[in-house]
Image (cartoon, helix red, strand yellow):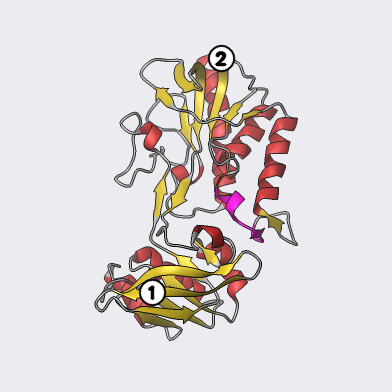
Amino acid sequence: MDFELENKVVIIGSGAAGLTAAIYAARANLEPLVFEGFQAGGQLTMTTDVENYPGFPNGVMGPNLMDLLREQAQRFGANCIAAQVEKVDFDLYPYCLMVNEKQIYADSIIIATGATAKLLDVPGESNLIGRGVSTCATCDGFFYKDKKIHVIGGGDSAMEEANFLTKFAKQVTIVHRRDRLRASKIMQDRAKSNPKINFLWNAELHEIIGTQKDGTNSFFYKDVKTNKITKVETEGIFIAIGHNPNTELFLNKIDMDDSGYILTEGKSSKTNLKGIFAAGDVQDDVYRQAITAAGSGCMAAIDAERFLEEEK
């Protein structure tokens, strides 16, 4: 593991936002140091076919796309390190990061640690992500044309996902563990008035059935009132219970909203701390797409470059 202890730009995270930032920063001769974290490549490494990323008319495998982005960043001089940032100190400038018991100093930092979809931690769930189990309707809805699918959740996210999926699916059933929804009234009304949407009440997801080869084919749910276990056939399951931004490392060190997303100024990637920028899903709770993450990574790199010029 070879890297400088003093750096112009350190990028924390290696998803679409982090690696795009690395490409732009490297082309500006800033020699960015990228700490990839435990899941190098971010959420796209858990996705099989990506069909909505520009430039790939026949689609591209998620892990392959991230490998291409990393290769492109490295070609221009980015140093990508498979390590996790363990601690940050934003009290003094240059900023200090602790990595593998080493102190790393940075004149600017781009935070691109992303967000993680909340999962239910039931049997079969993690094994079948990308094999009939999804956490993103906008990303994967197209693959479910004329199919009967299920959305797990009862909040605004679930209603939004279900309504969007009716553009493709033959039938969408919302599975909720209570007998009433948590979603706002307007979102409830939209879902309930959609003829393609059905509801399965008092149903708690118990287990997802399928194989890596053939995908998801059914699930078991428990009736929370009777404890009866029932099997239901399905052609796809969307887990829609929200996301958690990966910001634990920065708690009480940088301004965030009530949900833990890093706040940025206006149309920029600037945070409340000079020289620290945020890009991608760690600051975007609206779009959460690879292409928007990449765009904000570009913004963050340009903001960092301009900051460093001004500091000179």
Q: Which residue shows up at 68% across the image and 41% down it? A: 69
The residue lying furthest to the bottom in this view is 195
Quadrant position of residue 154: bottom left
Front of the two marks 1 and 2? 1
User: Which amino acid type is shown beneath numbered disc 1?
Assistant: Tyr
Q: Which residue shows up at 75% across the image and 62% down it? A: 58
Q: Is residue 271 above or below residue 90?
A: below
User: Which amino acid type is shown beneath numbered disc 2?
Assistant: Leu
The residue closer to the viewer here, 194 or 141, is 141
Q: Mark 1 vs mark 2: which is more N-terminal?
A: 2
Q: Based on the picture, tell me whether residue 138 belongs to the magenta stretch.
A: no
Task: Decide: few, some or many residues near mark 1? Use Cα within 10 Å; few <14, some 14-19, many ≥20.
Answer: many
Which residue is identified by label 2? Answer: 5
Which residue is identified by label 1? Answer: 221
Instruction: Name the quadrant of the C terminus.
Output: top right
Q: Horizontal and vertical percent for residue 117? A: 45, 54
Q: Is residue 105 above or below residue 124?
A: above
* Magenta segment boundaries in residue numbering: 43-52
